[in-house]
Amino acid sequence: MNFFIDTANLDQIKEANDLGILDGVTTNPSLMAKEGIKGEEAIMEHYKTICSIVDGPVSAEVISTDFDGIIAEGKKLAKIHDNIVVKVPMIKDGIKAIKWFTENEINTNCTLVFSAGQAILAAKAGATFLSPFIGRIDDSNWDGVELIKQIVDIYNTQGYPTAVLAASIRNPLHIVKCAEAGADVCTCPLDSILGLLKHPLTDIGLAKFLEDAKSLK
Ligand code: E4P
């Protein structure tokens, strides 16, 4: 399973990249707004900077909701860098746009996915990545990981090449469960990635080894 970081914060992207385990980045308009990025030029520049830090797919989301607008925005975003993936919402014009981008060899990430039916449509349109939002599903009292399992099963059965990118990750256990469920990618906040390091027995064991190592000097 590949690891993407789900943020537009450059320090966090650098920290995750320095770990040596980072395969890509996802952003969305809320994450960009959180960093105070404003205006088309600043947004384009920010994506360029992210692409210079991480050597892997970088999802940049369109904010248009009509076909022509999505295509115009996506074309501009795709020109920033070869690694840009145009992130398109799961709406009717979004599906049409994903089909157009597929035919024009522009990679896409279909976002705001909450059902297996939506996953089938996105795959039929040729989406490169599919982003089911598992944390938001859990927040709504359903089981996000079960949806990942269902989509992975359907894609394997039907031979769809679209990569399942588990999004809206809330904690390290989500990452483990997505790996078990067969997600191709998990996009995570830095805290959830770093949370994978934690185990009290590791801390206790290391403290003992370091204590005993004093007698070796
Ligand atoms: C990433 O592609 C999604 O936009 C993101 O994971 C959504 O996460 P949230 O539900 O925590 O906002």
Image (cartoon, rainbow, N blue to C red):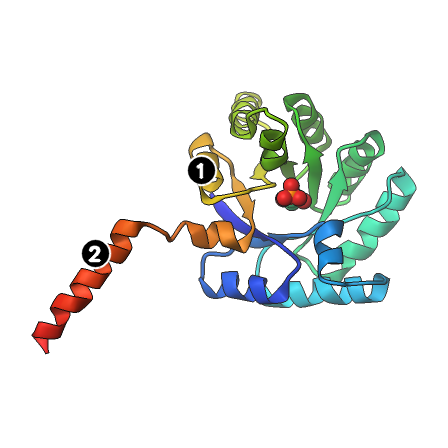
Where is residue 15? Give x, y as percent.
51, 65
- The C terminus appears in which quarter of the rendering? bottom left
- Say which element carries label 1: helix
Q: Which residue is mark 2?
A: 205
Q: Give neighbour class at mark 2: few <14, some 14-19, many 20+ (Cα, 10 Å).
A: few
Q: Is 112 displayed left or right of 187 in the figure? A: right
Q: Which residue is mark 1?
A: 179
Residue at 52% in and 29% down: 145
Where is residue 150? Give x, y as percent.
54, 23
Q: Is residue 108 above or below residue 204?
A: above
Q: Amino acid at mark 1?
A: Ala
Of label 2 and label 1, which has the lower sequence position? Answer: 1
Whether residue 23 can be seen here: no
Where is residue 80? Give x, y as percent.
75, 61
Q: Give neighbour class at mark 1: few <14, some 14-19, many 20+ (Cα, 10 Å).
A: some
**Res. 140 image quadrant:** top right
Asked whether 117 or 139 is in front, the reply is 139
Residue at 55% in and 66% down: 14
Asked whether 199 or 1 is in front, the reply is 199
Q: Farthest residue toward the left?
A: 215
- Say which element carries label 2: helix
